[in-house]
Amino acid sequence: MLEGLLSGFVHVADPMNLALILVGTALGIVVGALPGLSSPMAITVLLPVTYPFEPIPALVLLMGVYVGTKLGGSFSAILLRTPGTPAAACTALDGFPMAERGESARALGYATVGSTLGGLISWGIAVTSIPLLATVAVEAKNADIALIGILGLVLVSAFARGSMLKGLIGVMLGLLIATVGLDPIDATDRFTFGVPQMMEGIPFTAALIGFFGIAVVLSDMQLVGRASELIADRVSLKMPSFKELKQRWQAIATGGTYGVFIGAVPGVGAESATWLAYATAKNRSKTPEKFGKGEPDGILTPEACNNATTGGTMIPMLTLGLPGDGSTAVMLGALVLHGIEPGVLLMKQSGDMVYALLAALLIATIFMFLLALGAIKYFVLVLRQDRSFLFPFVLVLASVGAYAISNTLFPVLVALVLGVVGYVLETRRFPLVTVVLGVILGPIIEYNARVAMVISGNDWAVFVGTWPRIILVAITVLLVLREIQKSLQAQKQRREEILTTASYD
């Protein structure tokens, strides 16, 4: 493990790779600070830029963006009370009241230190656990890989925003998109409708650009014309002392622990983790009444949790090929675009790239701290602007990126159509990450399931032929049954409420 990690740092220590991490982290801070923009969107728009790159430079750039957005969201949460990212909403509860008291510099300092320490905690756990889990996962056969993929789809559907039913509908839509083109086994046409361009399937990059680029811009059109007034005229950053951090170590540890372990659950992401960590810190505090009124622990805990999810989401992504959130779903797509198949064999087939990504995660966290420390006033300048001026650039870059796939207009049209579909789904609160995950995992699940069937002589019992497979099937079934039970209980409760209301009338 140490040899692989050292090799990863050697790869990343190349001046060009370091520059890409620095640029990506700075861009991520800006994107995270602007409400209406998002990490998945930024990574998606940058995907076409990485086409000429080798896999490692391409992915370390995206890693920088991913890490930077985590801290950037806290800037607008503290100074505007408008979180730049959903996960930063929790930070606004105590960050904004502190800024109202004229302590914005202290609040920004707590956010920066909390994010940095949370990132370092998660990096240490990820570096330790990923090689161990990969050693076990590499023994998986085709049937195991297919079942892991199916369980991942169900997990994301269960824990993503909205109901599990909406999540499963999103997954099914993604799987349907993934089936377009030639059958991977016998090369027959599927859903091509006589269109020659669809013989090769729906362009993967075009799907990502549509769902995470164009759809996001359409969803945020209401932001056009809105400039923001900061709570502080002059913005600076004041770091908390070591003594103060030592006194508040429990808040940081709580946030870091929740971030790593909840972030490692596919589909949960940072949003749920930060609220759970905040609630825990408040319940354990000797002065819970101070939370929501400018309590430093109310900033340290969610920010440590927020950045700790970066290492947590890497664990399922690099060992099982399952994303922890929307950003890692797009990064999985980046692996596919650069000819690397995500999944249980990733460490065995591309171990140097895995360790390079882990090294980039640490370096991006350090760059994030240094950039915030030295240039926060410049990053905050963008908060005073009408952020919608970026939307045309996003649309142009998205269209150019789609066109660059094959130098034809077909991918652009696909991106526009899927962008409108994504916008409609977003307005109906369907989690788009489930659609994208279906597109990514669909071909992997189909190929491995069909190969397993061929090897077993079309015997379906192959999927319950070992105890690990039985456990995977059991967990999947239990999750679905649990959702059915919840739906029935909700319907019963609604009927009782209707009857109660009718009786009063």
Image: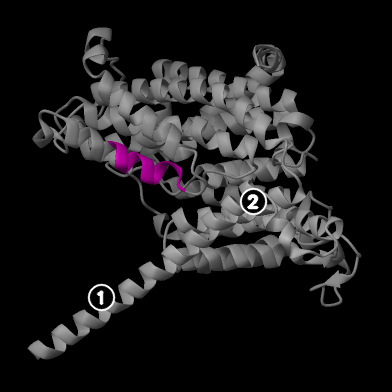
For the residue marked with disc 2, what is the amino acid?
A: Arg
Main secondary structure of the magenta stretch: helix
Left or right of 7? Residue 238 is: left
Q: Determine whether the residue tagged by mark 1 lies in a helix, strand or loop.
A: helix
Left or right of 228? Residue 473 is: right
Label for residue 493? Answer: 1
Above or below for 112 versus 327:
above
Which residue occupies 38% across, 29% down?
257
Q: CA distance from mark 1 to mark 2?
A: 36 Å
Residue topped by disc 2: 469
Left or right of 190? Residue 436 is: left
Q: Residues within 10 Å of mark 1 (few under 14, many from 20)?
A: few
- Where residue 481 appears, as percent x and y from the top left, is 46, 66
Whether residue 160 appears in this view of the structure is no
- Where residue 288 appears, as percent x and y from the top left, is 12, 34
- Give the colour scheme shown: one colour
Quadrant of the image occupied by residue 374: top left
Where does the magenta region start and end? 268-277
For the residue marked with disc 1, what is the amino acid?
A: Gln
- Where residue 24 appears, as percent x and y from the top left, is 58, 29
Q: Determine whether the residue tagged by mark 2 lies in a helix, strand or loop.
A: helix
Residue 90 part of the magenta segment: no
Foreground mark, 1 or 2, reads 2
Quarter of the C terminus within the rendering: bottom left
Above or below for 461 versus 61:
below
Which residue occupies 64% across, 19% down?
19
Residue 270 part of the magenta segment: yes
